[in-house]
Image (cartoon, rainbow, N blue to C red):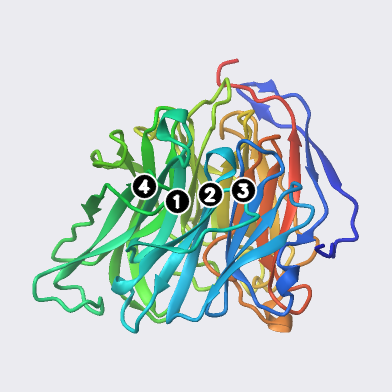
Amino acid sequence: MCKNYSAMLALTVQLGVLTFGAPLAQAQITVGPNIDVSSARASTPHLEVVIAADPENPNGLIACSMVPDGVAAYISDNGGVTWSAPVIVTGAPRINDPTCAYGPGGVVYFAHKLKETAGPSDLDRLEVHRSRDGGKTWDEMIRGPQTTDRPWIAVDMRPERGPWGRLYVSYNYHVHGEATELNHSGDAGWLNAVALQASDDGGKTFTTFAMRALVGDSAHPHRQPDMGGTAVLSDGTVVVLYEHAVGGGLNPKTHKTFIVQSALMLLRSSDRGDSFEPVNTVADIKTSYNEPHTRGVTATLAVDPGSPAFRDRLYTVWGDVRTGRTEIMIASSPDKGKTWSAPVTVSDAPQAARDSGGPDQFMPTVAVNKEGIVGVLWYDRRDNPNNRDYYARFSASLDGGATWLKSVRVSSSANEPGKKGGSVTNGDTSGLAASADGRFHALWIDNRTGTPQAWTAAITVAGKPVAAGR
């Protein structure tokens, strides 16, 4: 049993917004108690989390996280009330970047990168864990394809795709020239690329390989894709989101590449992963990648699973510093990723005059429930004058992302890295999933116990979605 550290009662917030010149019906956001997902490993620091919900079973959830020298997965079969800890992988030179998803009939996938020998990340492989019974038992780990950086998985669950579903993995891939060593310390002789592969046998074999390289120019030869996610639409179209970042030397604040300009891009495959269509631009952005206290995976992606008003509508959220602080923005696509709306600001923290700057909001993630309600979770510093600590916060849209309800705090305790360990960002991702009963399940890291742990809360948004023009 997982210990519940939250003494608060469920939080209910009455909210109203205006859209299309008429008032929406009153909406409610209800946040349930905070639950320590990783309490089975209470002394182990956790960071960088992802969560997935079984679209066929409202009680099925998987949460995955990085731990020191490895990754771990947690399963709930009662809608997030309690969690088991069935999988942990450690002991290799590098194990990181967890991702997870559900397939049909209780199939669960947990994947991550693993490097079996010393050397650069060009030698990393995808490792796939799968369960056939909702996470109770797990097959032996499967060694997948070469995967350089930040894989994301998604599953086509249509019946014609078979008992495993069609498993897709997207990732950053390095293309090296004939005389280039397998490292990427310089800009010459290699290119970053976006890759997509597919498997019909539960990850044992991958039978497709689609790839598009990011081509530079003489002024800025270095281009990198910050991978943001993969989704499958109702007709089987696969979409891959990434930030196309133009590098301009070393950033002394982060010891990573300094990004001089960037844009969010979406690649589509309408032939089951055999090829990519030409890229579509989502938005030009001012990336948060350059800021060490808000740096993470810049953008994430979600698709409406089939609501009457917004079926197949795509949403992407990201952290943007165009106003001088990091804020959360969203854009949506009504035509399966071909065109995108103008960005809208989701985070609603007022600008504050403080010596520490901000307040910053960062680490956004997005999910859409079966009714077409869009939820966004992020880390927020409005209540933290030092602009280092944070709470997890949530907002929702009932009109396809055009307007947003007043946000609410999800975590009942702040992450305080100066007092209790951990870091100001705790990795590169937070988690949000929508379950089959329409609830949202948030997943974040905070260190209220003295050790950074993975926490969750169930969130209910009561209200009727309204389509544009209605």
Please name the residue shown 39% across and 32% down the image: 236
Near mark 4 (Cα within 10 A), the count class, few <14, some 14-19 or many ≥20, is some
- Judging by the rendered image, the residue that carries numbered circle 4 is 199
Residue 230 coordinates in the image, percent (x, y): 43, 47
Q: Which label's residue is closer to the chain start, 1 or 3?
A: 3
Amino acid tagged 2: Ala
Q: Real-space Cα distance between discs 4 and 3?
A: 19 Å
Q: Which label's residue is closer to the chain start, 2 or 3?
A: 2
Residue 228 coordinates in the image, percent (x, y): 43, 53
Residue 251 coordinates in the image, percent (x, y): 38, 77
Q: Which label's residue is closer to the chain start, 4 or 3?
A: 3
Q: Which corner quadrant of the image does residue 412 belong to? A: bottom right
- Judging by the rendered image, the residue that carries numbered circle 2 is 101
Q: What kind of element bears circle 3?
A: loop
Q: Real-space Cα distance between discs 4 and 2?
A: 14 Å
- Judging by the rendered image, the residue that carries numbered circle 1 is 153
The dot on residue 133 is 3
Q: What kind of element bears circle 2?
A: strand
Answer whether residue 352 is visible to the viewer in this image: no
Q: Is residue 368 above or below residue 217?
A: above
Amino acid tagged 4: Ser
Amino acid tagged 1: Ile
